[in-house]
Amino acid sequence: MAEVSTETSSPHSQGGNRFRGPAANVTVMMDRDLLRYVLAILMIIEIVLGMIHWALIASTPSVHTAAYGWVMFVAVTLWLLTIGLFVVGLFSINRMISVPWVLVMMMYNGVAAVLYLTAFLTNAATAHRGFFFEAYLGAAAVSSWSCDRKSLQ
């Protein structure tokens, strides 16, 4: 019978699977415990409501009223920023950088509340009777108000 060698190479061998340079010591782990916190649950709700909000605004012909450009800008910008902040928290990137995370989240939610309030007022003021897409605009105004109330809590 022939012998079989079961030797494996060491992780420090000359293979091509090893990173070199500043990226060699960076490890990003997903923080599954974050999903248990109220802040993460509220961010997930805000992402869903934000997507519904901008989808309702995008489904109307906004060329009739220029104010919907502002509402769409607020909806999409804050939706993308919320996704970005959620990813930063989920992968614990906030722990790698020296930024006061609580202050960043407080400032973001304060600015988001003001912007959502202006979008709500703009949307509610321009959703007039007799317009074909009145139901969509009313629903978008309500979802904007829901996002605004979440940011205030």
Image (cartoon, rainbow, N blue to C red):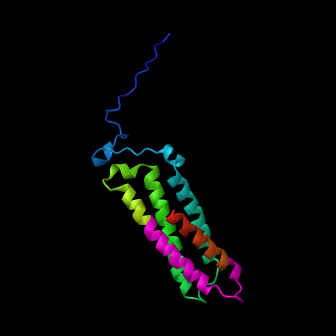
Q: Tell me: residue 59, above or below residue 13.
A: below
Asked where in the image residue 111 lies, by quadrant, the reply is bottom left
Where is residue 55 drawn, in percent x and y? 61, 72
Residue 80 sits above or below residue 37 on the image: below
Residue 29 in which image quadrant: top left
Query: Depth check: 135 or 84 in front?
Result: 135
In this view, the residue farthest toward the front is 153
Say above or below: 54 vs 65.
above
Left or right: residue 60 compared with residue 31: right
Q: Note whether 62 is above or below 116 in the view shown.
A: below
Residue 34 location (% of width, % of height): 49, 47
Which residue is at the far left? 21
Mainly helix, strand or loop, the magenta region? helix
Residue at 51% from the left image edge and 79% from the top image edge: 118
Relative side of 99 to 121, left or right: left
* Residue at 43 percent of width and 18 percent of height: 5
Nearest to the observer: residue 90 or residue 140: 140
Q: Which residues are magenta?
A: 109-136
Q: Between residue 116 and residue 149, name the one nearer to us.
A: 149
Judge from the rendering whether residue 7 lies leftward or rightward of residue 116; answer left or right: left
Q: Is residue 116 magenta?
A: yes
